[in-house]
Image: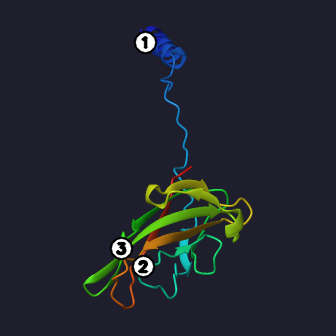
Amino acid sequence: MKKLSLTLIAGALVLALAAPSAVSAQQSASILAQATVQTPLTVTGVSNLNFGNVFPGVNPTVLLTDAGAGHFQIVGVLNAEVDVSFSSLPATLISGANNIAISYTGGWNTAANPGAATAFVPSAGLTELLDAATGELHVYLGGTLTVPANQAAGLYQATITLDAAYTGN
């Protein structure tokens, strides 16, 4: 009987060792979630749109290439696309209760050269690439004033505000 129980125990042990062990079918791997935040845009008002001395009944024009043209500079990541718009592009210049109508012309390029600027409609804005070498975009404003013959004397002003934002492209 001892021999039989020893044989049974030995057999059970052989079966236990021969039985397949539990193998995990699950495998895993890891990845990183990451982002590189790029340099923010800088927007600088380089020069004001300046009509100088204006006379009643005379409608002066400032061309993009004139010394009085407005000029903004945008600097950011090389070759990045930006949206440019004006959050303030007033229809009039104001002096107290008096005003003068203004219309605008616009131009842009990636070099500080208004003579080589590409025309655009300022009220429509634009979407362009910053320069691939310098990361710059230059925006120029010219315009025409409509000055009635009975316009009151005074200093007429209004604030023009350019907004620029990366598109993500």
Quadrant of the frame with the N terminus: top left
User: Where does residue 86 sit, x and y in percent of width and height?
Assistant: 43, 65
Closer to the observer: label 1 or label 2?
2
Q: Are marks 1 and 2 in contact (CB under 8 Å)?
A: no
User: Where does residue 94 sit, x and y in percent of width and height?
Assistant: 33, 82
Pointer 3 residue: 92
Residue 8 versus residue 105: which sits nearer the camera? 105
Q: Is residue 77 left or right of residue 124?
A: right
Element class at badge 1: helix
Residue 121 versus residue 99: which sits nearer the camera? 99
Query: Which label is found at residue 57?
Result: 2
Element class at badge 2: loop
Q: CA distance from mark 1 to mark 2?
A: 125 Å
- Type of amino acid at the residue the image marks with label 2: Gly
Q: Are marks 2 and 3 in contact (CB under 8 Å)?
A: no
The answer to which of marks 1 and 2 sits earlier in the sequence is: 1
Category of crowding for the residue at label 3, using alpha-carbon neighbours closer than 10 angstroms: few (below 14), some (14–19), many (at least 20): some
Query: Which label is found at residue 53?
Result: none
- Type of amino acid at the residue the image marks with label 3: Thr
Q: CA distance from mark 2 to mark 3?
A: 16 Å
